[in-house]
Image (spheres, grey):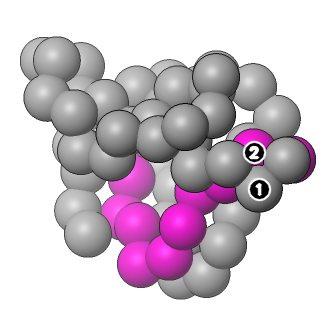
Amino acid sequence: MGLFYCRASRKATGDSTLTSLTNKGTVVDTNGKTVTIIGSDGTIYVNGTSSYTVTVDEYQK
């Protein structure tokens, strides 16, 4: 697990699990599709079109 701060677009290359994510931009995969961001409690913060998912304990937009 790690911390991640996103101010602009970032590209994901696979599923990830993070302790905390502060997202001020867009998380996309290498094809430009938006990545789903879901809380460890099941809350969907971003419902993306990519097959990749980022699971977070804490999320701030």
Residue 44 in percent (x, y) is at 22, 33
**Residue 4: image tag:** none
Residue 27 on the magenta segment: yes
Q: Quadrant of residue 23?
A: bottom left
Residue 18 on the magenta segment: no
Q: How many marks?
A: 2
Name the amino acid type tagged 1. Gly
Residue shown at the point (75%, 25%) measured from the top left: 14
Q: Which residue range is magenta in the image?
A: 20-30
Residue 34 in percent (x, y) is at 57, 50
Quarter of the image with the C terminus in it: bottom left
Residue 36 in percent (x, y) is at 45, 36
Residue shown at the point (55%, 37%) measured from the top left: 49
Q: Nearer the viewer, residue 32 or 37?
A: 32
**Is there a contact, CB below 8 Å, between mark 2 and mark 1?**
yes
The answer to whether 43 is drawn above or below residue 41 in the figure is below
Q: In this figure, which residue is indicated by the disc labeled 1?
A: 32
Q: In this figure, which residue is indicated by the disc labeled 2?
A: 29
Q: Is residue 27 visible?
A: yes
